[in-house]
Image: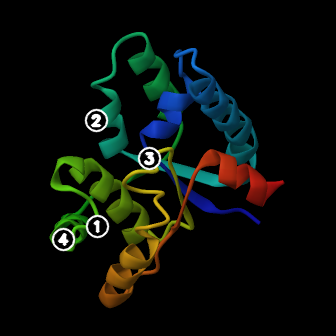
Amino acid sequence: MSALIYVETSIPSFYHETRTATQFQARREWTREWWGVARLRDELVTSLAAIAELEAAPEPKRTKCIALLEPLPLLQSSPAVDELVAVYLKHMLMPTDASGDARHLALATFHGCDRLATWNCRHIANPNKRAHIERVNAMLGFETPLLITPFELLEIES
């Protein structure tokens, strides 16, 4: 069954990872493997927030990462999304210096995504934050997308 999956900044970043340490190379391979399956079966979406974050990457990675996301539909921001971001920051779901992370979560939540694919395990796919995020979203009348890494998605989708 097809899932609506929001792709945040870390996915194209790891898809085009050049660092040689084993942990980075493993994430790159898992990302590429997942991407090859997901883009054919699921509906992948992203946002201008992800594109804007990638604009800060050095070349040639910047161009490659943005090109990877280019075919994906963009979820639109709105005052309602901005309000969600503000609530997330007020409830300390994300640190204020990670307001981009709050925006990714708000976009995926507001638009009813089934999953948010990320390698950001500190602020987004953090199991210690999951219950808090779900409580805040439930209080606001939203379901929380599954916050998950490509590695975990490979396990679900195999």
Which residue is label 3 attached to?
120
In the image, residue 52 above or below residue 76? above
In the image, residue 91 above or below residue 139? above
C-alpha span from label 4 to label 1: 14 Å
C-alpha span from label 4 to label 2: 20 Å
Q: Secondary structure under badge 1? A: loop
Task: Kindly identify the amino acid type of the residue bearing the numbered disc 4.
Answer: Glu
C-alpha span from label 3 to label 4: 22 Å
- Of pointers 3 and 1, the one earlier in the residue sequence: 1
Taking the image as drawn, is residue 121 in sight? yes
Task: Kindly identify the amino acid type of the residue bearing the numbered disc 1.
Answer: Leu
Taking the image as drawn, is residue 76 in sight? no
Instruction: Tell me where residue 20 sits by quadrant.
Output: top right
Single out the residue that lies furthest toward the right: 158
How many residues crowd mark 4 within 10 Å: few (<14), some (14–19), many (20+)? Answer: few
Q: Residue 111: x percent and y percent?
A: 42, 68
- Of pointers 3 and 2, the one earlier in the residue sequence: 2
Q: Secondary structure under badge 4? A: helix
- Residue 83 is labelled as 4
Q: Residue at x 77, y 55 (%)?
A: 155
- Of pointers 3 and 4, the one earlier in the residue sequence: 4
Which residue is label 1 attached to?
93
Do labels 4 and 1 touch, CB within 8 Å?
no
